[in-house]
Amino acid sequence: MTDEEILSVLRPDGTADPSLDPGLPEPELLSLYRHMVLLRAIDEKAVALQRSGRIGFFVPSSGQEACSIGAGHAVREGDWIFPAYRDHGVGLMRGYPLAALVGQILGNTADATRGRQMPNHWCDRSIRLVSVSSPVATQLPHAVGAAYAAKMRGERVAVLTTFGDGGTSTGDFHAAMNFAGVFRLPVVFFCENNRYAISHPVEHQTASRTLAEKARAYGLPGVRVDGNDVLAVRKVVGDAMNRARAGEGGMLIEAVTYRLGPHSTSDDPTVYRTEEEVAAWRGKDPIRRFAAFLKGRGLLEDPAAEEAGAKESVRRAIEAAEGAPPVPLSSLFEDVYADIPWHLAEQRDSLLPGKG
Ligand SMILES: Cc1ncc(C[n+]2csc(CCOP(=O)(O)OP(=O)(O)O)c2C)c(N)n1
């Protein structure tokens, strides 16, 4: 392949290219599909919750489901994940529970971080899903640090970090890629080029022909993949993670995709994109594309029933999490110190007399 070519597995007729098909077992194929549908259902409901004032903030991933779910499926037990804020699907695919995800955006006692993180900033120690970073691309050097540690300890694990096209313009991208190249670290840089960094188009982000080609300067391979093709993403990220686990170093992957919705619930994309552009990408919807493949294989009969089932799961998870009580004030003083220092004890006692 040339530098600019984009690897696809799903063909326009709905079949898979046999030379590139990762050959996943049928239950796994269905699981990929169901997680993509679930991710879309979460998006729709979370945006509605924000609009009705029940949550403060949300970052949708509609249009990019093949990226999160395909990449998440390539992560194995023991691997580390340093995600971007749009990649809750990676965690979901690794088993991060829907109840925990919903609890996090509500920030009550159903939230593992007890309302201390900004909404949309998930983490789960049990699957090595490190907390989402708000500042763009700061997760990249963190991922490289974890990869360096894994290498020093002789662990055969890989680290996946995800970020957007805007992330490639940061100093952290340079520092992370350089360090990963020099020390041949087991880290996969998965860049979702969704064409915009909020309102800033990728053409104004870089003068490079592609984002993948930036890898060459750091001595890493760089490849482009169709980010609306879940089998292609799974194949490319899976190969890169295997290579990293085998001690062959890191890789930069540019997934070419599109964000169908707003950047976040605080954004209005109609002021910087045309309806025609959005409609053209709607025609490449990653879920519909994969559904066509599954139907052709006789694995999927009723996509509408799958969507209804996912919506119902989300509705039930929200109902359960909304019933959880708010986090008590006393939690302000918990979980940081084993023995609370005198000055905090004093503050606690003045705020909550008799609770010390
Ligand atoms: C260091 C830093 N600068 C600016 C911001 C504000 N900001 C939040 S998201 C974003 C755009 C990032 O775009 P991209 O990396 O392409 O990812 P995408 O949101 O498209 O997934 C910006 C500028 C920030 N969070 N951190």
Image (cartoon, grey):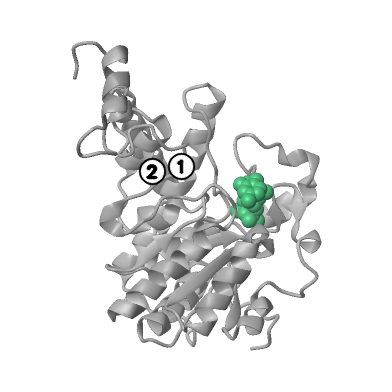
Other-residue count near label 2 (Cα within 10 Å), few / some / many at <14 / 14–19 / ≥20: many
Q: Residue at x 36, y 56 (%)?
A: 129
Label annotation for residue 278 = none
| Residue 274 in the image: above or below residue 33 | above
Observer-nearest of 330 and 222: 330
The three-letter code of the residue at mark 2 reads Ala
Observer-nearest of 98 and 203: 203
Other-residue count near label 1 (Cα within 10 Å), few / some / many at <14 / 14–19 / ≥20: many
Q: Position of residue 150 (x, y in %)?
A: 33, 74
| Residue 222 in the image: above or below residue 307 | below
Q: Position of residue 205 (x, y in %)?
A: 76, 61
Label annotation for residue 310 = 2
Q: Where is residue 221 in the image (x, y as percent from the top left)?
A: 57, 84
| Residue 14 in the image: above or below residue 120 | below
Determine the image quadrant of residue 26.
bottom left
Observer-nearest of 19 and 14: 19
| Residue 132 in the image: above or below residue 290 | above
Residue 269 visible: yes
Q: Residue at x 64, y 34 (%)?
A: 266
Observer-nearest of 158 and 97: 158
The three-letter code of the residue at mark 1 reads Ala
Q: Which residue is drawn at 56% across and 49% down?
A: 62
Determine the image quadrant of residue 338.
top left
Q: Residue at x 40, y 62 (%)?
A: 81
Quadrant housing the N terminus: bottom right
Secondary structure found at label 1: helix
Q: Which of marks 2 and 1 is nearer the N terminus?
A: 1
Left or right of 242: which side holds 196? right
Marks 2,1: beta carbons within 8 A: yes
Determine the image quadrant of residue 264.
top right
